[in-house]
Structures are given as C-alpha cells and as structure tokens.
Amino acid sequence: MKTRLLYILALLCVAGWINPVNAQNQRIIDSLMNELNGDVADTTLLNTYLTLSSEFVFNSPDTALYFTDQALDLAESLQDTLSIAECYNYFGIVGTIQGKYVTGIENFQKALEWYEKGEDLEGASILINNIGVVYG
C-alpha cells in the first residue's frame, strides 16, 4: 500500500513539472507567431521560422515542415549557408520521426554538406551523429 501511494505521489509530482514546460513552450510559440505578423527584417523572420521549426519538430512534425520550408526559401534567398544546413537538419529529423529513414538520411547528408561549406565543424559533427543514430 505504501509503495502504491509513493508511486502515485511521484506521478503527480512529475505531472506538475511537465505542465509548466508545455505552458512555457506555448508562450514562446505565441510570441514567435506574433513576430510573424509584424514588420521584421528578413534575418529576424528567418530566425523566427527556424525557432518555430525547433519548437514543433518533435510534437507536430507537419507544422515543423511548414516552418522549415518557409525558412529554407528565405535562407536560400539570403544565401545563408548555416541556416540552409539547419533547415535540412530539421527535414532529416522529421523524416526519421515519420519513419522515412532514407529521406531522413538524405536530408542529413545535405545538411552536412552545407555545414562543411560554412566551415561549421560543430554542426557537421552533430549531423554525423544524427546519421549514426538513424543507422544505429
């Protein structure tokens, strides 16, 4: 009986920690969505799209794809190498989440190429790890 009571108490504590995190993420998302309605510089808009992609990538992959598509179009027009790489990374993550492993790896490889063009070794190492996770 004591064990069961402790288990229930632990679940309630964990549930109490999870809700504020979701509420905090929702506040971030709401703030970012408001930025989209304003008159902002292209780089700010690009960063907003990328942050929204990050917020949605695991919980709502289709929404993440929408914002990543928007970010990629803008990053290409700005010729922002590292943002293009980040977009392909999100495409890769969504692909693997949806079970499209080949598509995921292809996008990770594109992201790796862009990180290498931008001479971002940290980004490249993250992509190599992402590819390894899919194969693992």
Image: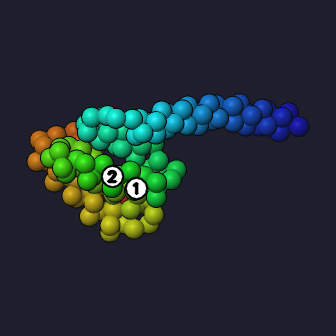
Q: What residue type is labelled 1?
A: Tyr
Q: What residue type is labelled 2?
A: Gln
Q: In which quarter of the image is residue 118?
A: top left
- What residue is disc 1 on? 66
Q: Could you tell whether 5 is left or right of 112 in the image?
A: right
- Residue, far front: 39
Q: Which residue is drawn at 17% across and 45% down?
A: 78
Q: Badge 2 local density, few (<14 within 10 Å), some, or many (20+)?
A: some
Q: Quadrant of the C terminus?
A: bottom left
Q: Are marks 1 and 2 in contact (CB under 8 Å)?
A: yes
Q: In which quarter of the image is the N terminus?
A: top right
Q: Badge 1 local density, few (<14 within 10 Å), some, or many (20+)?
A: some
Q: Which of 17 and 35 is in front in this view?
A: 35
User: Is residue 51 in sight in this rendering?
Assistant: no
- What residue is disc 2 on? 70
Q: Nearer the viewer, residue 9 or 87?
A: 87
Q: Could you tell whether 101 is left or right of 59 in the image?
A: left
Q: Where is residue 2 in the image (x, y as percent from the top left)?
A: 85, 33
Q: Could you tell whether 11 is left or right of 71 in the image?
A: right
Q: Quadrant of residue 23?
A: top right
Q: Which residue is drawn at 51% across and 53% down?
A: 60
Q: What element carries label 2?
A: helix
Q: Residue at x 22, y 58 (%)?
A: 109
Q: Position of residue 3 (x, y in %)?
A: 81, 36
User: Is residue 117 in sight in this rendering?
Assistant: yes
- Residue, far right: 1
